[in-house]
Image (tube, rainbow, N blue to C red):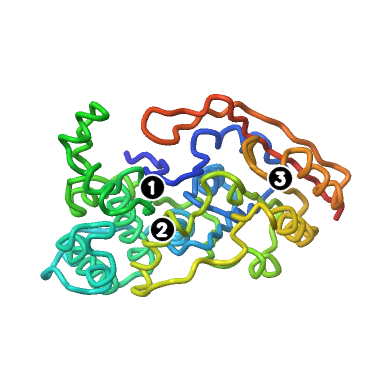
């Protein structure tokens, strides 16, 4: 019997470890949840598991495809014929080879990625494509030191040298040098097993949040925006994968919550659009800007029923370094309909 479980994602800011705590605070009269910044899909997946109708959204295409694969998708998985197709043919000198050889991967690795992309586009289902791209994402991230695409090539090569890695960190990190295909196949069953039917019409979107809000009705909106002032440049970390999917260079998106100078304005703009949702849940932490007190002031402009709870949440940053004084906040808002 297969177990439905969120597959391994490797996404900075993922809420997987504190999802149970977040879900404890979903009111009993909620049927539909709108996960507006779905990221690694941990909250959307938990909500789907609990039987809610889930609407997920993320501005990164690869996060949208992940949600399409395991939130919107109720039954389609990758079969043996799909796998044969994905890995068929010869390496190709395409977009990745021309733009990112010896920037993030070796030339022969880029040619493999170009081949896989061309084949994924031949799959006969959008859900199969979404699953395949999600597995390629997992493979790319596993081969990348620190799991993000913002390191210079000389550092990547150095960290992929197993002898150097062992001498410096006492770990060879051999997975950096496993092939994309090996990573894909070793994660395939886990991703296929994550697909299940909760008998709701779940839907995934890939839009700027300010464009999408007018189109979405739900009982509760969950907000997990990039935490301003922390490691939150998600296009810088994962935009390469979006470019790979789109097969072209992309510009960083706007409304990205990166700039401290505009953070309060963008939060206020966001909150001003949410009056139609009965409940709001907002995740944030004590290392970010605006502060807890500033966010409370903003939220109380739009509701008299606002509270905040907190939880110590230790998370790994790089290597063996941990932030031990981090507190995760959950702001709970109820509006008058």
The answer to whether 208 is drawn above or below residue 321 in the figure is below
The answer to whether 5 is drawn above or below residue 60 in the figure is above
Which tag is nearer the camera, tag 3 or tag 2?
Answer: 3
First in sequence, mark 3 or 2: give its number.
Answer: 2
- Helix, strand or loop under label 1: loop
First in sequence, mark 1 or 2: give its number.
Answer: 2
Which residue position is annotated with label 3? Answer: 290
Which residue position is annotated with label 2? Answer: 69
**Neighbourhood count class around disc 1 (C-alpha, 10 Å): few under 14, some 14–19, many 20 upward:** many
Question: What is the C-alpha distance between the residues marked 3 and 2?
Answer: 34 Å
Horizontal and vertical percent position of residue 150: 38, 53
Which residue position is annotated with label 1? Answer: 194
The answer to whether residue 14 is left or right of residue 264 is left
The answer to whether residue 33 is left or right of residue 298 is left
Horizontal and vertical percent position of residue 296: 80, 42
Q: Foreground: 229 or 208?
A: 229
Horizontal and vertical percent position of residue 106: 19, 58
Horizontal and vertical percent position of residue 162: 17, 37
At a point 47% along the width and 49% down the height, the residue shown is 40
Question: What is the C-alpha distance between the residues marked 3 and 1?
Answer: 36 Å
The answer to whether residue 296 is left or right of residue 284 is right
**Neighbourhood count class around disc 3 (C-alpha, 10 Å): few under 14, some 14–19, many 20 upward:** many
- Helix, strand or loop under label 2: helix
The answer to whether residue 66 is left or right of residue 190 is right
Question: Which circle marks residue 54 in the picture?
Answer: none
Q: Foreground: 123 or 8?
A: 8
- Helix, strand or loop under label 3: loop
Question: What is the C-alpha distance between the residues marked 1 and 2?
Answer: 9 Å
CB-based contact (under 8 Å), mark 1 and mark 2: yes
CB-based contact (under 8 Å), mark 3 and mark 1: no
**Neighbourhood count class around disc 2 (C-alpha, 10 Å): few under 14, some 14–19, many 20 upward:** many
The answer to whether 230 is drawn above or below residue 236 in the figure is above
């Amino acid at each position: 019997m297969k177990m439905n479980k969120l597959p391994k994602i490797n996404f900075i800011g993922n809420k997987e470890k504190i999802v149970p705590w977040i879900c404890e605070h979903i009111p009993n009269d909620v049927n539909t949840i709108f996960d507006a910044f779905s990221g690694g899909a941990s909250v959307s997946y938990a909500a789907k598991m609990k039987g809610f109708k889930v609407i997920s959204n993320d501005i990164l295409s690869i996060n949208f495809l992940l949600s399409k694969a395991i939130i919107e998708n109720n039954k389609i998985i990758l079969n043996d014929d799909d796998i044969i197709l994905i890995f068929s043919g010869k390496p190709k000198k395409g977009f990745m080879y021309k733009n990112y050889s010896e920037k993030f991967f070796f030339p022969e690795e880029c040619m493999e990625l170009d081949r896989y992309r061309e084949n994924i586009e031949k799959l006969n289902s959008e859900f199969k494509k979404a699953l395949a791209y999600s597995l390629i994402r997992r493979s790319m991230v596993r081969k990348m030191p620190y799991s993000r695409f913002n390191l210079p090539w000389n550092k990547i090569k150095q960290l992929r040298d197993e002898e150097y890695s062992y001498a410096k960190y006492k770990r060879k990190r051999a997975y950096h040098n496993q092939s994309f295909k090996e990573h894909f196949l070793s994660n395939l069953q886990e991703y296929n097993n994550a697909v299940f039917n909760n008998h709701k019409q779940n839907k995934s979107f890939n839009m700027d949040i300010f464009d999408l809000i007018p189109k979405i009705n739900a009982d509760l909106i969950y907000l997990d925006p990039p935490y301003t002032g922390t490691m939150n440049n998600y296009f810088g970390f994962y935009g390469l994968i979006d470019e790979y999917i789109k097969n072209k260079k992309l510009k960083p998106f706007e409304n990205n919550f990166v700039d401290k100078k505009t953070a309060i304005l963008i939060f206020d703009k966001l909150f001003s659009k949410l009056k139609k949702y009965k409940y709001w849940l907002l995740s944030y932490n004590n290392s970010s800007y605006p502060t807890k007190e500033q966010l409370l002031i903003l939220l109380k402009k739009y509701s008299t029923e606002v509270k905040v709870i907190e939880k110590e949440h230790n998370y790994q940053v790089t290597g063996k370094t941990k932030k031990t004084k981090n507190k995760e906040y959950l702001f709970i808002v109820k509006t008058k309909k």
